Structures are given as C-alpha cells and as structure tokens.
Amino acid sequence: MPVPTLTRPALRAVLRDALRLYLVTDQACMRGRTLSDVVLAAVHGGVTCVQLREKEASSQVFYAQACALMALLEPLDVPLVINDRIDIALACGAHGVHLGQSDLPVTVARKLLPPHVFIGWSVESLDDVQRAQTLPLDYLGLSPVFATPTKTDTAEPWGLAGLRRARSASTHPLVAIGGIHAGNAAQVRAAGADGLAVVSAICAADAPKDAAAMLRAIADAA
C-alpha cells in the first residue's frame, strides 16, 4: 500500500481497497501456531490488511511483535494497523491505528500521528457514525455486526439492517467485524461493508491460507 501524504478523500479511496479483507489477530485462537506463521499464510491467501491486537501483552512484547509484523508485511505491501496503542504504532512505523470508544480521542491521535498514518474508529451506534463525519478519521469499524465470542465488551450487534443504515449515514470506508465468516460474508458486503474484518474465521481455521482465500473470493465478487 502506498504511504505518501494524501488528502483525506484520496486516502479513503485507497483504503476502500486496502481494507477489503482485514485480519485482526488473536493469538488465543491460533491453536499453538506462531503469529508470524498465521499472518503470513493469511496474506498469501488474500488478506489485504492486518491489525495487531494485543490486549494482554506487555508494551515490550507488543512492540517486538509489531516490529516483526512490519518486517513481514511491508515487503508484501500489506498495511499493518496497531490496535489502541499510538506509542507502539509510532515506534514500529505502522501504517495505521485503530481506536475504540474509550481510547485516546481521535482529534488528539490525529495531532500525534504523521499525516500518512490512517486512523480507524470503532462505532457501536448510529450516533457514533454521524459524529464520525466531523472527526479526522479514515475508516470506521462497525462492531459487532453479529454476536461473537471473541469480543464481548461491545453494544448490541448491528445486524445487516443496522449496517445498511450506517452505510447510508457515512461517507467513510466501512469495515464490518464481529461474527463474520464465509457463510455470511457475501451478505455483509451486499449490505454496504467495504471491508470484512475477521478474527477466528482465519486465526482458528485448520488452514488459514485457504480460509483467507475463500473470504477474499467472496469480497472480490461483491
């Protein structure tokens, strides 16, 4: 993915493609496999963006993992997004940061980050979506679309109808996350999601590369 300084509309246009199949890591789901092995297999299968999410790791471990993934992904032109931690994103040179409702305010994050580092924001209600229109954001993560055991600290699921309403209310690229798998991914794309974000559908799969390839084919067909 190119990382020059772009205008926000131009960056959003790039992101609609770069976020098409978005892997969010969860090492608890990886069945003993290494983070690098699962991520590399997923990228070879068609993943277009990777978010490193480490809720329990120390800063030192998180930083080391982020640097390792940057070294892995940058030659493949796949952007790395850091969940929550702006300091880690700056330290490893990540392409993007994803923030939740309780994280550092978006306006503050934008001041701290270089212009080419994009910001995603989790939205849990239509009010959040509408408020995002006034914030210096680059994409929205609708969370959760469906109920999911991998993320339990969220509001009621959006459902497909809620996703359609969000699409009508927003000019941002929309990434849908929560309970998405090969059986419902086409419906999610048809309801207006620019990107499919998945956790266990790839991280816990018998063959992460094959699982990613199936999801990428669905994303590309929409």
Image (cartoon, rainbow, N blue to C red):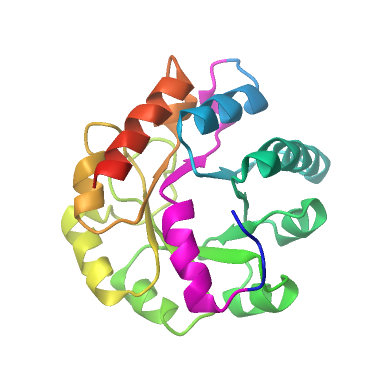
Residue 78: image location, x then y, percent: 59, 45
Instruction: Judge by depth and name the residue closer to the eye, 23 or 122.
Output: 23
Residue 180: image location, x then y, percent: 32, 39
Residue drawn 70% across and 38% down?
A: 69
Please, which residue is most extreme toward the bottom here? 134
Does 199 lie within the magenta span? no
Residue drawn 78% across and 51% down?
A: 92
Q: Is residue 64 left or right of residue 41?
A: right
Residue 106: image location, x then y, percent: 58, 74
**Where does the magenta region start and end?**
6-31
- Asked whether the viewer can see residue 168, the reply is yes
Quadrant location of residue 56? top right
- Residue 10 vertical position relative to residue 157 in the rendered view, above or below: below
Instruction: Judge by depth and name the residue closer to the eye, 137 or 74.
Output: 74
Count of numbered circles on the image: 0
- Residue 27 vertical position relative to residue 17 in the rendered view, above or below: above
Does 27 lie within the magenta span? yes
- Residue 56 vertical position relative to residue 165 in the rendered view, above or below: above
- Asked whether the viewer can see residue 138, the reply is no
